[in-house]
Amino acid sequence: MDVKEIIARRIALELRSGNLVNLGIGLPTAVASYVPHGVDVFFQAENGLIGMQPLPDPGFADENLSDPGGSFVGAVPGACSFDSCMSFGLIRGGHLDVTVLGGLEVDERGLLANWMVPGKMVPGMGGAMDLVTGSRRVIVAMMHTAKGRPKILRKCTLPLTSTRPVNLIVTELAVLEPTPDGMLLKEVAPGLSAKDVAAATDARLVIPTEIPTMRLTP
Amino acid sequence: MHKGIALTEAVEQISDGSTLMIGGFMGIGSPHRLIGELVRQNRKELTVIANDTARPGFAIGRLIDAKLVRTLVVSHIGTNPETQRQMIAGEITVDLVPQGTLAERIRAAGYGLGGVLTPTGVGTLVAEGAQSVEVAGRTFLLALPIAADFALVGAHRADYSGNLSYALTARNFNPIMAMAATTVVAEAAEIVPIGVMPPDDVITPGSVVDYLIEREIVNGR
């Protein structure tokens, strides 16, 4: 299984029927493909839609209906559209159940950096700061390391996205949860040990005696 | 009141150095004819307030390609490498604002508010230079109103009086910007006679719209 599919499949299991969910651009978008049967969620797009779904055919694109990345999408029956103030009112006002975002770095307290690398890459924060600050639950979907270097650190070196800690981090190696005592190792990927995860992590891990294997199916 | 204006005439009113709000999100819902005419008339040194700069060759990206923008106030430029290049080369100043804060700053200007308190950005680079305010034990940042000389609005439907409605995700910043500029110029995909739009369908009241770009008849005379 592709490593990104592992991450997307595991995060999809976190979603519950009735959830309003925002998926970031890139890796988080893949989560939509693995929502278990019987779990009905609505996907919010911060450009002004609840009820986003993929297009059945590129030929059916509507020039007025896209995802936040500008790619054309469809809408489910029961979808609704709104302006940017309403969209961010939903996000900031605590009406969004789950947001899934990519990450450049996460520290052991769960603080996320994902919007700029000073002097190198300044894409801007877009909706990320509002999403991390306002969503009820924040899940980070990212590769565990970048070019062999850990991305889960004792302290972030890059500018923070928010001072609100994320709730869960899912990588191709592990599922981790920031706690007051440190970064709790909750699950490890099939075939890996806690030692493997620790070797790829800079943050101090809280390692229980029994660690379940990462679930990938309901 | 007759709001119709020719495309060329509308853009002739916009002088070099103007501050423009331009609707659209990754170009979806942007006023594409107005943008094209800004390029044709070479309106320079512009300050553009918008969600993003789309991508090269498309929507606000066309203004970037033509080097008509001096200052940008946007939430992200990650999809337009040319904007990033001009920023790194020092040819363009980019003020990055969290998307929800940008929407509220524009709304504050249009709704007559002195600012908005938001939790977004507290403790980050965004908080530098911003005033912090404590309310009931929580910290917020004061987001100040941001207004413009012109709002260039992309609508789905307009009537002759300037009432506007929008389609799907093409709505985005358009109705908020239509409240926040000295002069509001709307471009609509469809223009219908007064009375055709049910009152409940009108999102932007024609009262705030100064000009409506006239149709371009391609076939016939």
Image (cartoon, coloured by chain):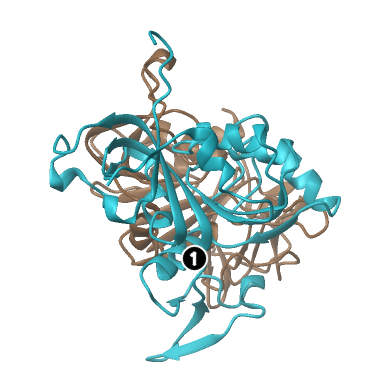
Chain colours: A brown, B cyan
Label 1 residue SS: helix
In this rendering, the answer to whether A54 lies above or below A163 is above
Residue A2, horizontal then vertical, whole percent = 59, 29
Q: Residue at x 22, y 46 (%)?
A: B202
Q: Report how many numbered discs are placed on residues in the image.
A: 1
Pinpoint residue B139: horizontal percent, then vertical percent.
48, 85
Note whether residue A211 is visible: no
Residue extending furthest toward the top: B220
Q: Residue at x 19, y 43 (%)?
A: B201
Asked if A59 appears above or below B196 in the picture, the reply is: above
**Residue A98 pos. (x, y %):** 38, 55
Pointer 1 chain:
B
Give percent across and percent down for residue B127.
61, 77
Residue B187, quarter of the rendered image: top left
Question: Which is more toward the observer, B163 or B101?
Answer: B163
- Position of A218 compared to B183: left or right? left
Determine whether, in the image, residue B159 is placed left or right of residue B68: left
The quadrant of the image that shows the C terminus of chain B is top left
Q: In this orientation, which residue lies closer to the viewer: B56 or A152? A: B56
Q: Nearer the viewer, residue A8 or A52?
A: A52
Residue pushed farthest right? B89
**Residue at point 54%, 34% (across, down):** B8
**Crowd band around label 1 with a 10 angstrom C-alpha radius: few (<14), some (14–19), many (20+):** many
The residue tagged 1 is: B101
Q: Nearer the viewer, residue B142 or A99?
A: B142
Residue A152 visible from this viewpoint: yes
Residue in view at x 63 percent, y 69 percent? A108
A207 is higher (above) or lower (below) than B140: above
